[in-house]
Amino acid sequence: MATAEVVNKLEELHKDHNPAADFLPLLGTDHVEFYVGNAKQAAYFYQVAFGYKLVAYAGPETGVRGKASYVLQQDKIRLVLTTSFDPDSSISEHVRVHGDGVKVLALWVDDAEKSFNETVKRGAEAAFKPYTISDEFGEVKLAAIKTYGETIHTFVERKNYNGAFLPGYAPAKSPLETTPVGLKYIDHCVGNVGWGEMNKWVKFYEDVLGFKLLITFDDTDISTEYTSLMSKVVSNGSGFVKFPINEPAEGKKKSQIEEYIDYYHGSGVQHLALATDDIIFTVSELRKRGVEFLVVPDAYYDNLFERVGHIDEDVKAIKALNILVDRDEEGYLLQIFTKPVEDRPTVFYEIIQRKGATSFGKGNFKALFEAIELEQGKRGNL
């Protein structure tokens, strides 16, 4: 789909969106929960490297006996890191199979029970039925449905709650002094699925959650000499929640999606795209704190500014930080991708700043995937 078509699709999608008629109105992403092997150490990493603030905790000290969870926040982004004390629990099994990875993509809603009923009626499989939890700060209603792999969507209704996070969690403050790096909100969340499964899950989001297909990338858009993949982006009516879904495509060598599926042992969340209003500041800070990024070839910048035109940011800084730039009819965007943030080549992050652009950086795909292939080659997985 051409960029102009993407913009038109976005305008059409949001113009036609009627919140009153939407059977699944989403207010945004409530939180993302990772199941990890050691939540305390993972929380330390995200505080030091990414500048998150510890805001809540649940564990034995709060009456939760079988697990510990740390809630980290930066502006509108909320991560929950959970580890189990029971080797036979579903949390431990998830970590054993997948390594540290995303279990829950929680969606903020006004009515969790209605959200559950409407999606189950349309074919969703229940992860757990609606229930209410409460404490002195009010009540929260929760329900969840299954999506690709072992990932679930939890519907969170918190309009009658003013506590730190959820009942069962206590406010927490780390003795570690942290400073934010300018991350604002989750721009989009990308899932990797197996061979031939992309259309199945696109249809799931369309039929079950009422999302619309926003854009399609095929193997002619996302390919190099050696590898390729296919991707479709679905979005809810308001545009607050966007999920690109990737699947492998045939190539001479193993694609990044195949590598992910091999090491994650199934479908799952590949990366979160985190928005910033100042990517030069954010990336500079992340690099100072030891976050590693993919390296695109120097040749990428040879004709970059002839292709994208004028940008407001300092060109030397963009090159020095290895930031990618792309333009569409609405404006331009700047983006960069971390290396995997754990030993398995699975989960990573995208840092993105939108200067009007509504697309996803199609002009950067070739350079990006060549950079990923370079890392795959070092791991012996290309």
Image (tube, rainbow, N blue to C red):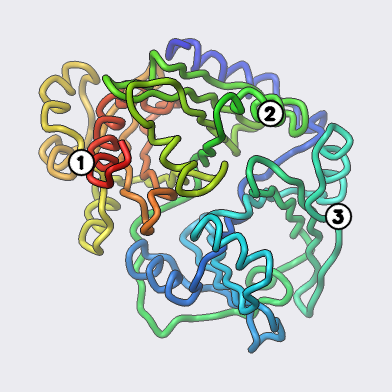
* Local SS, label 3: strand
In space, the residues marked 2 and 3 are separated at their CA atoms by 22 Å
In space, the residues marked 3 and 1 are separated at their CA atoms by 45 Å
Q: Which residue is mark 1?
A: 295
In space, the residues marked 1 and 2 are separated at their CA atoms by 34 Å
Viewer-side label of 1, 2: 1
State the image coordinates of residue 264 (x, y, percent, origin top left): 50, 49
* 84 to 267, vertically: above or below: below
Q: Residue furthest bottom?
A: 61
Q: Residue at x 50, y 69 (%)?
A: 37
State the image coordinates of residue 88 (x, y, percent, origin top left): 67, 72
State the image coordinates of residue 3 (x, y, percent, origin top left): 43, 14
Residue neighbourhood size for the residue with mark 1, other residues' Cα within 10 Å, grouped as few (<14), some (14–19), many (≥20): many
First in residue order: circle 2 vs circle 3: 3
Residue neighbourhood size for the residue with mark 3, other residues' Cα within 10 Å, grouped as few (<14), some (14–19), many (≥20): few
Q: Which label is found at residue 129?
A: 3
Q: Is residue 96 toward the left or the right of residue 159 in the image?
A: left
- Verify CB contact (< 8 Å) between mark 2 and mark 3: no
First in residue order: circle 3 vs circle 1: 3
Q: Quadrant of residue 303?
A: top left
Q: Which residue is mark 2?
A: 211
First in residue order: circle 1 vs circle 2: 2
Q: Residue at x 68, y 49 (%)?
A: 152
Q: Residue at x 10, y 23 (%)?
A: 302
Identity, as a three-letter code, of the amino acid under mark 1:
Val
Viewer-side label of 2, 3: 3
